[in-house]
Image: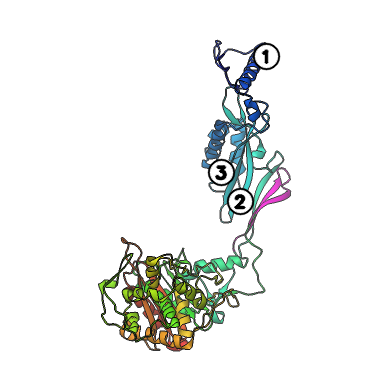
């Protein structure tokens, strides 16, 4: 016996001898229903009771949604978001009222282009398909008004689907008696000051403009406002559906105090403007005795704060940390001979900048000339986790610093294989940092103790570190000083104050030019800078730091 045709939902036309547009009588509907019911029972018998598995009109779960309904819902939302309101209205059961409401809904609310996102559809027992959606309405100068609503869709006699129009689908609180109104509060500025109460402004110090705005907003400054539900006739406020901005700015507490030193900040801004040559660059100066950030500058000055949030391979400036690990273990002394060949292969070929070599060099000379192959040759002197453990234990790298604004506080994960370990010895691979982290590394090496970097006085992180032994600190300082007097940082040699430094040239990719680095200290101040695509630290980053140190008297260090 041939199987009968499967059951179709009401509203779907079935093939028949009658023309497609022929009217269907009530008696005809009864006869068709009886035939379909008989066919369904026969199909259930023929398939061994498939209805028990949840098929057909007796299923215990909700029927699946028609894909055409979800397509129509998404099309409606797309037209609404794009401002095609006539088309959006045409997808509803009441085109003219729908178009009018959508057009007037945002009047006076100063809303830009909305983002409307549909989620999973569900089907009710009566066949109505419901499509929840999230609306994100950007309010000019304030933020985003986000809310959730639902689109009901019903199948029409012709088999198409339309949004079953009602005011509440636009927003759950929209109805015939209420509407929405935007209220703006007064914009209050919050002053920000540096060391000694000196006022800081983005006009004077362009690199600080984004930071000042962020600190001011956190203190309650900036624009405020709300979207309110009001009576259409009386204007009486009935509730609030969205608020923007924080509490009113503090007044009695005075300006937001920071650790920025205007002298150091001005020097950093000027140096980047003069020596970055249009490249992305960043610099940080901090007090080694307190961890206070004295300067934070970026080129370009607006936008991303690469000085404290950048993620770069620190290159050979990381050899400060690697040297610390080797000295702590007694694996080498400054006078130990560690040959520096042009090439060394560990899974891949490593080489020195400009393919230099120093046969018979001592470890101290390898440091001052930044010999990659020499440092990589010492990799087996350290356990796989030792460099990472030293970075965390003594330099705080990998711990959360909480400087007062968002920052990336460095990464030095344990190495996975010999090639990774070789790369990590010279600040490549998975080792990451930025001028903030490398200024802190330099401050720790020079002072012997890690100090939590901070932009806000009194802000303390949860780092736990151990001071370096004095003999290790003494040897690090001596090698960094030699790097200035006779090594790759000779560009700083004419400066007073016993400057010590370590340069770095970090590979980015085979196609991109290297980044240039330098990390230096003078007295109690540490400075680090990076120049993207600067080719080498000596050529690009050293001149930046030279200008900064030359502009600030040595007695301020």
Q: Which residue is mark 2?
A: 145
Magenta range is 222-242
Q: Nearer the viewer, residue 259 or 419?
A: 419
Q: Which mark is residue 30?
A: 1
**Mark 1 packing: few (<14 Cα in 10 Å), some, or many (20+)?**
few
Which quarter of the figure is the N terminus placed in?
top right
| In this rendering, the label closer to the viewer, 3 or 1 | 1
Tell me which label, 2 or 1, sits earlier in the chain: 1
Task: State the colouring used for the structure image.
Answer: rainbow
Q: Is residue 233 located in the magenta-colored stretch of the structure?
A: yes
Image quarter for residue 103?
top right
Question: Residue at the location (26% across, 76% down)?
Answer: 357
Q: Position of residue 158 (x, y in %)?
A: 57, 22
101 versus 37 height, above or below? below
Q: Position of residue 329 (x, y in %)?
A: 44, 81
Q: CA distance from mark 2 to mark 1?
A: 51 Å
440 versus 419 height, above or below? below
**Mark 3 packing: few (<14 Cα in 10 Å), some, or many (20+)?**
some
Residue 356 shown left or right of residue 85 in the figure: left
Q: Position of residue 309 (x, y in %)?
A: 48, 67
**Mark 2 packing: few (<14 Cα in 10 Å), some, or many (20+)?**
some
| In this rendering, the label closer to the viewer, 3 or 2 | 3
Question: Residue at the location (46% across, 83% down)?
Answer: 525
Give the secondary structure at mark 2: strand
Give the secondary structure at mark 3: strand
Tell me which label, 3 or 2, sits earlier in the chain: 3
Q: Is residue 82 located in the magenta-colored stretch of the structure?
A: no
Residue 301 shown left or right of residue 461 in the figure: left
| In this rendering, the label closer to the viewer, 2 or 1 | 1
Q: Which residue is mark 3?
A: 117
Q: CA distance from mark 3 to mark 1?
A: 42 Å
């Amino acid at each position: 016996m041939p199987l009968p045709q499967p059951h179709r939902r009401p509203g779907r036309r079935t093939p028949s001898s009658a023309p497609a547009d022929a009217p269907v009588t009530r008696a005809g509907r009864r006869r068709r229903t009886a035939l379909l019911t008989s066919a369904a029972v026969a199909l259930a018998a023929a398939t061994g009771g498939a209805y028990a598995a949840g098929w057909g009109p007796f299923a215990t779960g909700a029927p699946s949604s028609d894909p055409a309904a979800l397509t129509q819902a998404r099309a409606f939302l797309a037209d609404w978001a794009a401002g095609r309101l006539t088309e959006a209205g045409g997808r509803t059961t009441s085109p003219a009222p729908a178009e009018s409401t959508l057009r007037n809904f945002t009047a006076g609310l100063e809303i830009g282009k909305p983002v409307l996102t549909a989620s999973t559809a569900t089907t009710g027992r009566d066949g109505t398909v419901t499509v929840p959606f999230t609306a994100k309405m950007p309010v000019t100068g304030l933020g985003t008004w986000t809310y959730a609503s639902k689109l009901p869709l019903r199948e029409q006699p012709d088999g198409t689907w339309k949004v079953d129009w009602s005011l509440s689908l636009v927003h759950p609180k929209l109805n015939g008696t209420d509407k929405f109104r935007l209220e703006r509060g007064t914009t209050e500025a919050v002053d920000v000051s540096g060391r000694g109460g000196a006022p800081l402004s983005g006009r004077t110090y362009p690199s600080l403009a984004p930071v000042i705005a962020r600190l001011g907003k956190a203190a309650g400054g900036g624009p405020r406002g709300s979207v309110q539900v009001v009576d259409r006739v009386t204007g009486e406020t009935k509730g609030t559906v969205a608020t923007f901005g924080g509490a009113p700015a503090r007044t009695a507490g005075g300006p937001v105090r920071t650790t920025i030193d205007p002298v150091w900040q001005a020097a950093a801004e000027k140096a980047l403007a003069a020596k970055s040559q249009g490249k992305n660059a960043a610099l940080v100066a901090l007090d080694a005795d307190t961890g206070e950030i004295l300067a934070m500058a970026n080129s370009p000055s607006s936008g991303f704060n690469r000085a404290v949030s950048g993620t770069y391979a620190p290159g050979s400036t990381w050899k400060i940390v690697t040297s610390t690990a080797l000295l702590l273990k007694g694996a080498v002394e400054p006078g130990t001979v560690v040959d520096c060949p042009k090439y060394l292969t560990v899974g891949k070929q490593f080489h020195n900048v400009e393919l230099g070599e120093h046969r018979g060099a001592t470890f101290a000379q390898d440091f001052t000339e930044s010999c990659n192959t020499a440092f990589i040759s010492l990799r087996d002197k350290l356990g796989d986790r030792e460099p990472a453990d030293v970075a965390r234990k003594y330099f705080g790298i990998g711990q959360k610093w909480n400087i007062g604004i968002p920052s990336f506080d460095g990464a030095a994960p344990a190495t996975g294989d010999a090639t990774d370990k070789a790369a990590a010895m010279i600040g490549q691979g998975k080792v990451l940092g930025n001028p903030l982290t490398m200024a802190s590394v330099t401050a720790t090496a020079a002072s012997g103790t890690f100090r939590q970097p901070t932009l806000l006085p009194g802000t303390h992180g949860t780092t736990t570190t151990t001071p370096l032994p004095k003999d290790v600190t003494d040897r690090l300082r001596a090698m960094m000083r030699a790097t200035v007097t006779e090594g790759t940082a000779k560009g700083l040699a004419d400066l007073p104050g016993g400057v010590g430094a370590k340069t770095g040239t970090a590979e980015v990719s085979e196609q991109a030019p290297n980044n240039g680095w330098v990390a230096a200290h003078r007295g109690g101040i540490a400075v680090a800078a990076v120049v993207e695509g600067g080719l080498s630290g000596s050529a690009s980053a050293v001149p930046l730091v030279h200008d900064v140190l030359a502009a600030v008297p040595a007695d301020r260090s």
